[in-house]
Image: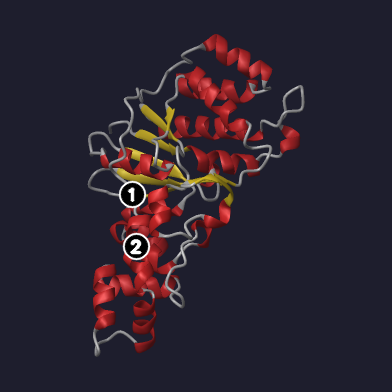
Amino acid sequence: MTAPLLAVDAPSLYFRAYFGVPESSAKTASGQPVNAVRGFLDMLATLVRTRKPDRIACALDADWRPAWRVELLPSYKAHRVVAEPAPGVSVEEVPDTLAPQVPMLLEVLEAFGIAAFGVPGYEADDVLGTLAASASRKAPVEVVSGDRDLFQLVDDERGVRFLYVGRGVAKLEDCDSAAVVAKYGVPPEAYVDFAILRGDPSDGLPGVPGVGEKTAMALVNRYGNLAGIRAAALESVGEMASGVRRKIADAASYLDVAPKVVRVADDAPLPPVDLTLPRAPKDADRVLALAEEWNLAGSCRRLVDALAA
């Protein structure tokens, strides 16, 4: 089988690393926490060793809350905003000891020669969606994230799998279409409509009040998609319960815009980047220097070994 492109949601993994590795166990000699860096490198080493990709891309949030999404739905990620220094610019709430680790991580990845990039005006999810859109059976893509919105990218025909790390890389869920159906009761192509109805407080998506996961699943399976559900809700008679019909009708303004907000982009203008998985660090001396300076020797060695294998 052709080796896959490993498309990694970097923010998802470094946030998980930060909260999963105690600060007290991962610091530099000067006391600088490096728990997110160390945890991310260890997760990446595990993924490279077990998934055996021949290409890799770490997607970044060049814009974690794009203005075009906020314009459609002002509540989008609004609860995570700590400052708005300029119109259309939102500063995300990030733990004080995590923020300095992100540029450190990027410096280590650069020394290894592992591609890490974002696209202005787009989130990491959109970079992943665009990479997934290029997949084919001959060149499959495995998307890695703890963000459940990315279940929408699964596509058996084109060879897109979702490696869900919501419970950590050690308990990774390797998801094809059947796995999505088993988990949520809807196929990947209907996941966006299901998620819109259900909502997601973590992203500021209100959903349709009174419509939970089970009702959302039943509606999608009964009427096929959001358009079918909304059409059925407008009928004066039909199988849809009057209470559900009313809830769908009352949420019309949200349902008008939510699809564009929830669906990840598949046409972000990706920069020309070499995604080839390095078999050895691009700058071995720099990796050694950073590993010594930031107390990352064990994690860097594990990643070196994974790449060489």
Q: Are marks 1 and 2 in contact (CB under 8 Å)?
A: no
Q: Position of residue 156 (x, y in %)?
A: 27, 48
**Residue type marked 1:** Leu
Q: Residue at x 39, y 23 (%)?
A: 277
Residue 153: image tag? 1
Quarter location, residue 137: top left
Q: Position of residue 141 (x, y in %)?
A: 33, 38
The residue identified by callout 2 is: 257
Q: Which of the marked residues, 1 or 2, is nearer the chain's N terminus?
A: 1
Q: Position of residue 149 (x, y in %)?
A: 41, 54
Q: Residue at x 49, y 21 (%)?
A: 110
Q: Residues within 10 Å of mark 2 (few under 14, many from 20)?
A: some
Is 130 situated left or right of 125 in this image? left
Is 255 situated left or right of 139 in this image? right
Q: Return the residue nearer the eye: 249 or 302.
A: 249
Rounded to the nearest angstrom, the CA distance separating label 1 from label 2 is 20 Å
Q: Return the residue nearer the eye: 74 or 100.
A: 74
Q: Inspect this view and state whether residue 309 appears.
A: no
Give the secondary structure at mark 2. helix
**Residue type marked 2:** Val
Q: Residue at x 28, y 49 (%)?
A: 155
Q: Return the residue nearer the eye: 224 or 263.
A: 263
Q: Inspect this view and state whether residue 272 appears.
A: yes
The residue most toward the front is 86
Relative vertical location of residue 289 with respect to residue 41 in this rendering, above or below: above
Q: Could you tell me how many numbered marks the image carries? A: 2
Is 193 situated left or right of 9 in this image? left
Q: Position of residue 198 (x, y in %)?
A: 43, 68
Q: Residues within 10 Å of mark 1 (few under 14, many from 20)?
A: many
Give the secondary structure at mark 1. helix
